[in-house]
Image: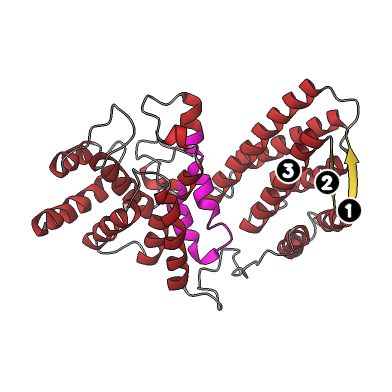
Amino acid sequence: MARFQVTDIEPDVFADLLDELQELYERCEHTLIELEHKPEDEELHRALFRAVHTIKGDLGLLSISPLIQFLGHLEDNLGLLRDSALSYTPVLSDLLLLSLERVNGFIRECHEKGEFHYDSQQLQRVEALLVRLTANNKEQHEQIIRSALLTLEPNLVLSNNTPDNQPDLSPPEQSRPEDDLQFFHQLIEPVEARSRYWQGRCDRQLKLALLINRYAGSPVDERQLTAACYVHDFGMGFMPLEILHKERKLTPKEIQLIHTHVYCSAKLLENMSYWHEAKMMVLQHHEKCDGSGYPLGLKDHEINDGAKILAIVDTFDAMTHERASVSHMRRPYQRAVAEINRLAGTQLSPYWVAAFNQAMQALLKAG
């Protein structure tokens, strides 16, 4: 292992740069999420290039030479993407995210200890692969990127992609979807146990979500919808309890922190190609039909149908069960149904609200 030590950097300067680097890292992560929906968006390609270029410049101020060279190669590759000489793929996204996570980790270690340790040979092997990406060997790009990713993180298991570079959505040979669903359910149980307001929430939402889907003719794959119901609020379990149980209005900063839970939840499915559709549902379940939702501000036709179902069951469950906020009033089912209908066309999908109404009529009659 090689060691890099920082010298002659004022602590307050380092702290300011660290804040900027964290902001740039989050900006890159957000852009990569957007690219999953708009892989050909040239403005997103340029935004990603600018962010990495700025990160490299900030590290230049700290004279962190090993990372500057590494980021220089990433910047060159993003230049190819910006110039349409390299195509965006999920594997490229994984490589960029992992690379930036490593850089972010090294910088934080440097800030805490004044130095960081890194595998110089591994870094050199990755750089040697990145240099091989050129405008003249497009047919080799995907294999080179996969090799670089596996060199950076040998323990990753990458699925084979179909010829059009879309994720292979068939179940892995060594794993059954039913086993994965059982695993997801086991994962969410301790998350629900963390708050007195969450007990049984996942199973309640799943029951209603599947019923809504069936009344609409089951256009959404039930396995994917089930996985999304289990996973969509996983990230909430990693929020500070003082925020989750805060009785007064959340501050803008606290709201922004809560919004990050969709990324944390989606990351759980990031390397499980079979669950790609469920991942999209998780990412989009707080989007609103009028474009006022988060994280991407998508509008009705851009939002995954499974995410639209999740948005309804999430909203309904919040209305009909106790919450920490003193301003929250638990509604009877009939009133909650009326409020859901008032949100149709703005926050919620009118099509799926109609299916929700049918499902609720059946549940209320049965109950």
- Residue 262 image offset from top left, x and y in percent: 48, 45
Residue type indicated by callout 1? Met
Whether residue 82 is situated above or below residue 123 in the rendered picture: above
- Residue 96 image offset from top left, x and y in percent: 69, 49
Instruction: Please give the residue where the numbered disc 3 appears in the rendered image.
Output: 105
Does residue 84 appear in the picture of this structure? Answer: no
Q: Earlier in the sequence, mark 2 or mark 1?
A: 1
Identify the image quadrant of residue 156.
Answer: bottom right
Main secondary structure along the magenta-highlighted residues: helix
Identify the image quadrant of residue 125.
Answer: bottom right
Q: Earlier in the sequence, mark 3 or mark 1?
A: 1
Residue extending furthest toward the left: 365
Spatial CA span between label 2 and label 1? 16 Å
> Tag 1, which secondary structure?
loop
Q: Which residue is painted at 51% across and 51% down in the image?
A: 266
Spatial CA span between label 3 and label 2? 14 Å
Instruction: Please give the residue where the numbered disc 2 appears in the rendered image.
Output: 70
Between 230 and 34, which is closer to the camera in this rendering?
A: 230
Q: Residues within 10 Å of mark 1 (few under 14, many from 20)?
A: few
> Tag 2, which secondary structure?
helix
Residue extending furthest toward the bottom: 173
Q: Nearer the viewer, mark 2 or mark 1?
A: 1
User: Which segment is the magenta one?
Assistant: 257-283
Which quarter of the figure is the C terminus placed in? bottom left
Identify the image quadrant of residue 145.
Answer: bottom right
Residue type indicated by callout 2? Phe
